[in-house]
Amino acid sequence: MPTLLLTLRRVALAWVILLFGAALILPNLRIQVRSHPAVKIVIAAYWVLLLIGTPIPLVRHFRRAWREAPIAPNRTIYVIWLCLETACAAGLMAFLLCATVAAVLVALR
């Protein structure tokens, strides 16, 4: 039975599809046209699913990468790069969480 594994490539592709689709479907802010509420609900649900699903492959990737640090050929550079990568991923997740909270607060206003 094949399992659906969340990989970084699949999650990145899902984010690209969401952002590109939202850019095409949702109207421009300067236009007086409003999008259908169902479209907004579908995009918001997809956003929440990705927000929940993104940390899973990130944690898996970083756990594997940090376990390989002691046997890396150029350990110093590897650890420096991995620290930068980890900080950027944590910053991205914090940004996504803050953007979600801000969007909810604006929607409730």
Image (spheres, rainbow, N blue to C red):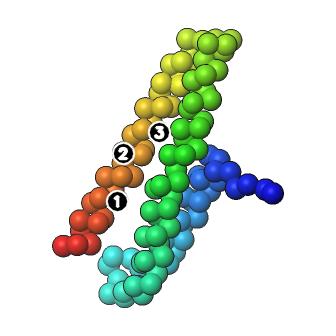
Q: Which mark is residue 100?
A: 1
Question: Which mark is first along the chain, 3 or 1?
Answer: 3
The quarter of the picture where residue 104 lies is bottom left
Query: As rendered, which of 47 and 18 lies closer to the eye?
Result: 47
**Label 3 is placed on what type of residue?**
Ala
Question: For the point 61% across and 22% down, which residue is it?
Answer: 67
Q: Is residue 95 above or below residue 33?
A: above
Per the image, label 3 sits on a secondary structure element best described as helix
> How many badges with numbers are in the image?
3
**Label 2 is placed on what type of residue?**
Ala
Question: Along the horizontal axis of the image, is 100 left or right of 16?
Answer: left
Extreme front residue here? 1
Question: For the point 61% across and 13% down, which residue is it?
Answer: 70
Per the image, label 2 sits on a secondary structure element best described as helix
Residue at numbered disc 3: 89
Label 2 – label 1 distance at C-alpha: 10 Å
Question: Which mark is first along the chain, 3 or 2?
Answer: 3
The quadrant of the image that shows the N terminus is bottom right
The quarter of the picture where residue 76 lies is top right
Tell me where residue 11 appears, x and y as whole percent.
59, 53
Per the image, label 1 sits on a secondary structure element best described as helix
Residue at numbered disc 2: 94
| Whether residue 109 can be seen here | yes
Callout 2–callout 3 Cβ contact below 8 Å: no
